[in-house]
């Protein structure tokens, strides 16, 4: 199942869940940015992750 991203779309459906997530921009002394290849899509992204909200 893929996720659809909506950015400033007035026709986007109302949210039905809350996802707590964070990302980080990590650089070295030469200004290079650390990236990770996503296992689900193969695309490059900033390192980060989500947290499941459960009891």
Image (cartoon, helix red, strand yellow):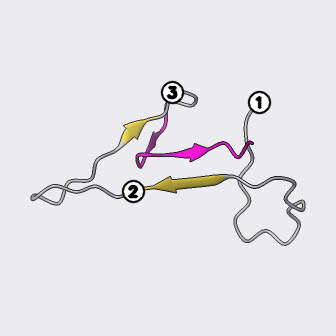
Q: Residues within 10 Å of mark 3 (few under 14, many from 20)?
A: few
Side (left or right) of 15 relative to 50: right
Q: Residue at x 89, y 66 (%)?
A: 11
The residue beneath circle 3 is 39
Tell me the CA gap for discs 2 and 1: 25 Å
Q: Write down the region rendered in magenta.
A: 43-55
Q: Quadrant of residue 32?
A: bottom left
Q: Secondary structure at mark 1?
A: loop
Decide if residue 38 is on the left or right side of residue 4.
left
Mark in front: 3 vs 2? 2
For the residues marked 1 and 3, what is the alpha-carbon distance in whole angstroms?
A: 14 Å
Q: Which mark is residue 1?
A: 1
- Label 3 secondary element: loop
Q: Position of residue 42 (x, y in %)?
A: 50, 30
Quarter holding the N terminus?
top right
Q: Which residue is mark 2?
A: 24
Q: Which of pointers 2 and 1 lies earlier in the amino acid sequence?
A: 1
Look at 75% across and 42% down and name the residue there: 55
């Amino acid at each position: 199942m893929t996720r659809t991203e909506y950015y400033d779309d007035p026709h986007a459906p109302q949210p039905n869940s809350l996802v707590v997530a964070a990302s980080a921009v990590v650089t070295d002394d030469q200004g290079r940015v650390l990236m990770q290849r996503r296992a689900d899509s193969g695309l490059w992204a900033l390192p980060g992750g989500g947290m499941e909200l459960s009891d």
